[in-house]
Amino acid sequence: MSAAKGKSFTPVELLARLVAFDTTSSKNNLGLIAFVEDYLAGHGVASRRIVSDDGQKSSLYATIGPDDEGGVALSGHTDVVPVDGQTWTSNPFTLRSEGGKLYGRGSADMKGFIASALAAVPSYKARKLKKPIHLAFSYDEEIGCIGVRPMIAELGKDLPKPRMVIVGEPTSMQVVDAHKGPVRWQVDVKGRAAHSSMAHLGVNAVTYATRLIGELERMEQELKQRVIDIRFEPPYSTLQVTKIDGGTATNIVPVGCTFVFDIRALPGLDPDEIETRLRRFAEKRCLPEMHEIAPEADIRIERVNAVPPFGAERKSEVVALALKLTGQNETYGVSYGTEAGLFQEAGAPAVVCGPGDIAQAHTADEWIAESQIAKCMDFLDRLGDWAET
């Protein structure tokens, strides 16, 4: 599905092209990346791939205007969540327009923003930009902001580092300057198997897993009272056990149990506190008893992914710019995570602002309003005005 050389597309036409690529995180995104490369090249814009270790996925980075550092990067992820188990009215990978809404997987989250950014390229090329506008498209955001990290590592090295970053996650074109940070752990409990009629000879891994979960529940209740920030819904850091698996048969003392938990941390919460407390509980309240029967018993706690909480600086230049471009005077906080905190940690101050409603993300019959695409295009046009000054 190639792009005709130098051809301009409307954002809706580009969105249809992008939605047609099934870029579910479990699959590769190389077809979409090749299409975007071809489209950009047709408008005289060079781009560079940052390929995953296995070669199956790639981020893409491009610069329009002066080929140097500074300016603004427009950041978006190319992957989408699965449609498995969902009932769709139409093919999720064929864009459908009805009643002012555009239906398709990723339409809101977040191919609508990528399509808008690509549709703005011909206009940007026709301008005399004094500040560069960069495009930064990543992969595997939906499974832990994985693909953006190698790209960020190249900023200021092989890739020009932007002065600011606008992450186009769906915010209904409102300016978001703070979000919670998802951090996820896996806990593996190893006991000793025994016949259930001789339970005293075994160590029940499920039992000790529940003790650990009980401690997590106590921490959860404390977090609800600890820090309240009414900008978020809910206004506190959350902690949840999200997956558990243990045991082998109904007549065997379980030798193993694994569970996963995560927190959605408010800016300012240190996830190390949670992990340190759980490790201490395991070492003092669980392992001594387990070792009395089974010296080989063990509890392993591994942090499997972390996306930092995001909070822009109070007088952040990029927040001021986003407010100016949207014509707004108020910012918002959200509970979902984005790549903004990773950019900010790398020295590129960020803000989140993009078309679509997060309530539609990940749902069956996901949609984005055409009016939101139009608002985004106006925003990007004003960004072009700014880049010319």
Image (tube, rainbow, N blue to C red):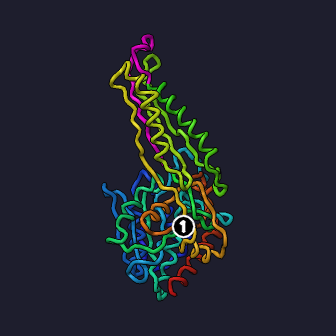
Name the spot of residue 95 as percent of width and height, x first: 56, 62
Give residue 66's quadrant in the image. Answer: bottom left
Report the magenta residues as a range.
182-204
- Residue 70 located within the stretch drawn in magenta: no
Q: Is residue 226 left or right of residue 127?
A: right
Query: Does any portion of residue 290 appear in the rendered image?
Result: yes
Determine crowd level at label 1: few under 14, some 14-19, many 20+ residues with C-alpha closer than 10 A. Answer: some
Residue nearer the viewer, 255 or 357: 255
Residue nearer the viewer, 308 or 256: 308
Give residue 358's quadrant in the image. Answer: bottom right
- For badge 1, the amino acid type reads Glu
Q: Is residue 121 left or right of residue 227?
A: left
Name the spot of residue 41 as percent of width and height, x first: 38, 77
Residue occupying the far right of the picture: 99
Q: Which residue is mark 1?
A: 313
Query: Does any portion of residue 94 appear in the rendered image?
Result: no
- Residue 202 located within the stretch drawn in magenta: yes
Task: Residue at 58% x, 48% y: name it.
Answer: 237
Image quadrant where one finds the N terminus? bottom left
